[in-house]
Amino acid sequence: MTMGFWDLVQRYRDDSGASEAWIMRKAGLNKGAFTAWRKRGIPVLPEPDQVAGLARALRVSQQEVVDSILETTQFFAQAELHGLGILSATAEITRPEGDVIDPNEPLPEEPEPRSDTDAGDQARDQ
């Protein structure tokens, strides 16, 4: 069974004697991140650089950090409880442009790959 995030943090603290403040600094998190996460829950997965920082600070793999956060938030249990697929269980997924992606939106169709002979045929047709 996967260890929850707070258990992971506590295990490292017990083994190393490090404070939560030290872990947050080492991970590059804001000073009150853990307090906010404890109070309101972990709303979304941290940014990739924060996951990498937490992994370095806690001396575990990035995958273990992600798994522990998913365990703590009961992400998969909540998705199953509500009969949702993985994508529709996430609160929001955004495109680089900033607009929210509807998880039920069909994927755009890929253009057919063109071969060199197609390009020559098009040139002759014009």
Image: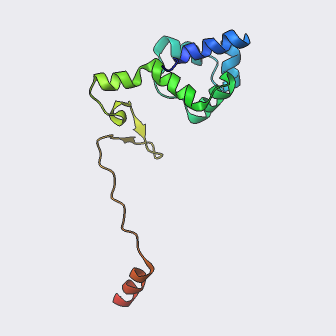
Mark yes or no: residue 23 visible.
Answer: yes
Is 5 in front, or is 42? 5
Residue 46 appears at what percent x and percent y?
A: 54, 29
Residue 80 appears at what percent x and percent y?
A: 31, 25
Choose top left, top right, bottom left or bottom right for residue 64. Answer: top right
Is 104 in front, or is 77? 77
Using residue 36 as the reference point, say whether residue 122 is left or right of it: left
**In the picture shown, does residue 114 fall above or below 36?**
below
Using residue 46 as the reference point, say whether residue 105 is left or right of it: left
Residue occupying image coordinates x 37% and y 84%: 122
Residue occupying image coordinates x 47% and y 16%: 41
Look at the image and name its color scheme. Answer: rainbow
Q: Residue furthest left?
A: 83
Choose top left, top right, bottom left or bottom right for residue 10. Answer: top right
Query: Considering the image in quadrants, where does the C terminus appear?
Result: bottom left
Is 48 in front, or is 97? 48
Q: Residue furthest front?
A: 1
Residue 111 appears at what percent x and percent y?
A: 36, 65
